[in-house]
Structure formats: structure tokens, C-alpha cells
Amino acid sequence: MTDDLALRFVSSVANVAAGVSPASQVPFLAPEGDFAVVSSGAGTFIDPASYRRFDALVDAFVSFETTAAVDLYRQLLPLFDEAHRSLGFPEGTFNEVFDTALGRLTDVPVPDLPPAVELDVQAYLLVDASLESLSPAEKHVLRLGPDNARRVQQRLTDLRAGLERAGVFQPGR
């Protein structure tokens, strides 16, 4: 792994842990196609077709075997720690930041149905105040759609459990 990739990964994880969108660090992960909505007498909702833009990315992400991902993380952790310090984080460890990011993403409430939205000047806002109040990083989980979001959350939960079993993370989150 190059130093640039390590810096990009660590910066993205730190952003997620802080609730900030990591999109500027990983523009190559942006989905193709446009965000779409559907309107009916009941309101305006995220078009389920918008969720399919993320299918290939989610399929690739969840295809990683947990044990292999844990082994890779353990091997790269010294590089991640170095990148973490070089980004100006003198206190704490990258593990703590990564654990916070995992928790932030796995704790996002995922609605069963596409949420209602309303147009506000140039962007759509979520009508449900509890969803609209989520951080930009957490809203990325919602944009995946219910099925993809749950698959990602399960994989992140499995990864965290694997890191805990391997002694990389402390139990109890």
C-alpha cells in the first residue's frame, strides 16, 4: 500500500468518525447516474432505482472475507498509525478513530421504505427530522438504500467483531 493510499484511507475514516463526508478523499467511489425521486399523491420519495447505483460497490465491499480483512488490517495498522500521526492527530490511536467510524456507520437507523424528501432550493432534504439530522457521513448509509445499507452494516459489524476476536479492538462497543 502506498503512503498516499494510507493517507487517503486514514483521512476518510477520520472524516467518517467526525461525521464528515469522506467523498472528497474517495471521488472514484461516487456512483454513476443521477439521484432520482418519485412523486405521488403521498409525497416525494427517493426513487428505489437510485439505490441500484450502489449495488456493484456494495457487492464488492461485502465480498471481502472477514478473516482476510482482519489480517490485512493488522498488517497495515502500523502504516495507518503513521498516516494518522502525519495528519496531525497527536493523541489517540487510529484504532480508536476506526472504531468510532464503524460505530457511527453501524448505528445509522435504516428505514424499511424509501424516505420522503422535499426540495429545498438546490438539494433534497429528508422530511423525517431524525434522518435529516444525521451527519453527512451517516446520510451516505441511507443513500445506499435499505438492502445495501443493511448488508454494509452487517459486514462492518462482522469486521469489528473479527478485530475484537483478534485482539485488535477492545471488547464492549
Image: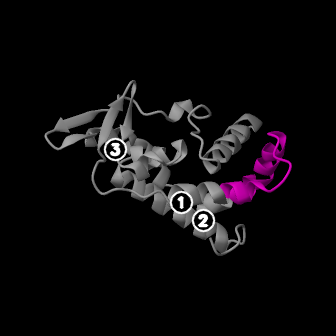
Q: Are marks 2 and 1 in contact (CB under 8 Å)?
A: yes
- Residue 84 part of the magenta segment: yes
Amino acid residing under circle 2: Arg
Q: Are marks 3 and 1 in contact (CB under 8 Å)?
A: no
What residue is disc 1 on? 156
Magenta-span inclusion, residue 14 = no
Spot the residue most to the top: 122
Residue wearing tag 3: 127
Query: Does 60 sit left or right of 46 as displayed?
Result: right
Q: Secondary structure at mark 3?
A: loop
- Callout 2 touching callout 3 (CB < 8 Å): no
Say which residue appears at 83% left-offset and 40% top-offset: 86
In this rendered view, identify the residue nearer to me: 125 or 86. 125
For the residues marked 2 and 3, what is the alpha-carbon distance in whole angstroms? 32 Å
> How far apart in space, not on screen, are marks 2 and 1 (Cα)?
6 Å
Q: Amino acid at mark 1?
A: Leu
Q: Is residue 72 visible?
A: no
Q: Helix, strand, or loop for circle 2?
A: helix
Q: Which residue is mark 2?
A: 160
Q: Which of the two labelled residues, at mark 2 and mark 3, occupies the earlier sequence position?
A: 3
Q: Earlier in the sequence, mark 3 or mark 1?
A: 3
